[in-house]
Amino acid sequence: MPAIPADPTVLHPMPEQPRVVLLKPLITSPLIEVGEFSYYDDPDEPTAFETRNVLYHYGPERLVIGKFCALGEGVRFIMNGANHRMDGPSTFPFPIMGGSWADHFDLITGLPGRGDTVVGHDVWFGYRSMVMPGVRIGHGAVIASGSVVVDDVPDYGIVGGNPAKLIRRRYADEDIARLLAVAWWDWPLEHLTGHIRTIMSGSVDELEAAAPRQEVPGGS
């Protein structure tokens, strides 16, 4: 009997657990991009992810999250709109208070930012971790619970703390290069479905052996 893939278009992949939502079918903002099967888990309002978990997103910077990412309860992405001026005596944003203070709105527009926030594939975010603006998180990374990520995270890195520091890499550099080359997250869904056990618990050798074979042009 052929293996049947899961459906990446359903909002609640576990109907008995409405706290879990797939983000791709939920997102409406053109400034947020999420890959298939990345999910968010929250017992309160998981469907409010765009407003409760992506903060100060006034644009134009984008939030990009890859495929197969697991976001624990309370994960927050702080976007560049949270910036305040720090080159004068006060950091207070007076113009947003209105009145004649609004005449000085140019003082809080066009503040320097760090660009898009980009998360790779297969990243695990622990409970109430926070990602600051413009951070880039590599494939296969793990963000410990309560971490505040202020700097880029390497592929298959485990980080923790405030500010988050690299604790260790999940694999040696040579094996990380092999994992990135295999890129199981880009496998056809039917093929991936037939190799779930290898993806979850196999060795790098076994994962390479399970990868789809490349068709040779003109081959028989």
Image (spheres, rainbow, N blue to C red):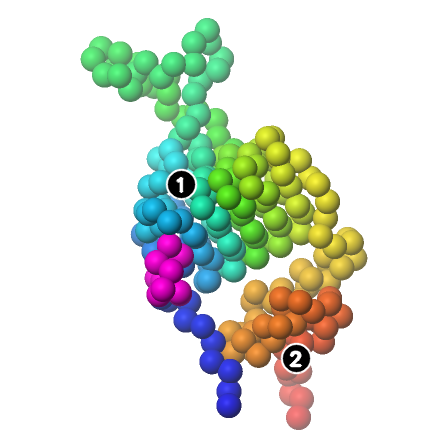
Badge 1 amino acid: Val
Above-or-below relation of 191 to 79: below
Q: Residues within 10 Å of mark 1 (few under 14, many from 20)?
A: some
Q: Magenta segment, principal secondary structure? A: loop
Q: Indicate whether residue 19 is drawn in magenta.
A: yes
Horizontal and vertical percent position of residue 103: 26, 14
Residue 213 badge: 2
Under mark 2, the amino acid is Arg
Which contiguous range is marked in magenta?
11-20
x and y percentages locating residue 33 in the rendered image: 42, 52
Toward the bottom, the furthest residue is 220
Q: Position of residue 159 (x, y in %)?
A: 64, 41
In the rendered image, is residue 136 in sight?
no
Is 83 located above or below residue 206 in the figure?
A: above
**Residue 47, percent from left and from top:** 32, 51
Location of mark 1 (residue): 54
Q: Position of 142 compared to 81: left or right?
A: right
**Element marked by disc 2:** loop
